[in-house]
Amino acid sequence: MRILPYELFGSYSKRNLLFEEFIPSGNEKWPSNWKEMPEWKTLQDLGFIETTTDRQTRLNTIMLKNTLINYLYPAGVVLQASGYIRDKGVDSGYISNKYDNLSDMLNYLIVRYSKELERNSVSERTGPLTQEQIKAINVFTQAPWRWNTKTESVDVDGKVVIVYNPTFNPEVIGTFKFGRVKGEFNLQGAYFDRDTLENFAPDYVGGNVMLFSVNLKDMKGFPSIVKGRIRISGTPGSLEGIPMEAEELSTDYFIARPWNIKNALIILDRGSVDVEDTRAGVEAIKRHWDDKPDRSKKASQLVSTVLSDDVLDDYFKYNPLKLHILDDYPDIKSGVLKRTGMKDLSGVGKGLQGGWF
């Protein structure tokens, strides 16, 4: 085989060999001269550097970091001779174990990071977004996303997690809005320096919505449709803006499964409780695990902020056969009937629910 002369970049540097030139040294599947592999040259062009420790070398392990896309696996990617690719920054860190040789592992990284670079460069997907905004969205999503020209928002084909990362300016949060998110929407309040979700949170979430350590003044801007559960941890000033139907609403003060008008009224009346509808259609109510007089009062106050006259009236206009859930709250029921001019169909609703008709 003809070996081309080395191309020197320094006293100890040489060019990487072509595919047909590379000859593995030692184990063919895990060559000791892997830095001469053409795949490694490609990875270097993508921003990778080697950060393998002496101990990892003795264990037949390679660790790589990417300096261009450092929000993906920021602690580094570990390649093990056993076939595992792991995220160094997570306890288990499992990424993949379906490759039995180093070449395939390196090619996996090439494909993964090439796609990520493409996300940063395709203008029709990013629309008018700035590079700082794109960088933040890529940190938050790690899933395919695109700019929706009709809604002027960002649609995501997976999960969104709002966390801090030193690679982007946190002030960019709130300068763009999410639209339709197919997966979960998680927000870490410690990294969210705004008191509102308006002009930022998505309109639709196909999974759960998890807000941790939030100090929002209210829930205006909250996703109007949530297909999964809602978890709010922290001290929100109000629940105004939250949708009235979800699989569950869990807060530091109460839990409702599902979250709906009926269970909201129970919390309004009883304070800090854990209420769950059974299969028989009867609610099971128990005290919240952190039930104290002040917290019970807070639970009722929070629910009162969302059960406004407008919310109640709109709900029962579209659900007139559910008026019977107000039977235990005659004053509220009377107000709804008076404001809407509706006919009281409580008896019909009860009959349908109980199987009488």
Image: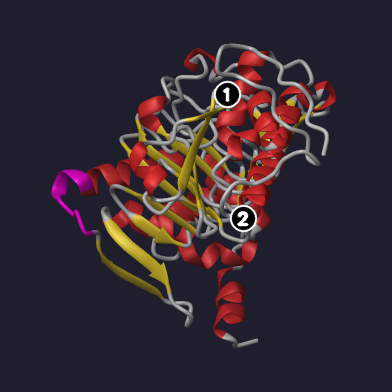
Q: Residues within 10 Å of mark 2 (few under 14, many from 20)?
A: some
In the image, the segment drawn in magenta is 289-295
> In front here: 80 or 289?
80
**Eyeballing the image, is 169 above or below 86?**
above
User: Where in the figure is residue 5, as x and y percent of width and height?
Assistant: 75, 21
Q: Quadrant of the N terminus?
A: top right
User: Quadrant of the rendered structure where residue 66 is?
Assistant: top right
272 to the left or right of 348 = left
Give the x, y percent position of residue 332.
44, 52
Above or below, comparing residue 295 to residue 164 in the picture: below
Residue under circle 1? 136
x and y, in percent, of residue 80 in the image: 49, 52
Q: Secondary structure at mark 1?
A: helix
How many residues crowd mark 1 within 10 Å: few (<14), some (14–19), many (20+)? many
- Callout in the foreground (2, 1): 2
Please state if 218 lies on the left or on the right of 118 as rendered: left
Name the residue carrying label 2. Answer: 29
The numbered dot on residue 285 is: none
Q: Residue at x 47, y 32 (%)?
A: 74
Residue 63 in the image, given as x and y percentages of width and height: 47, 39
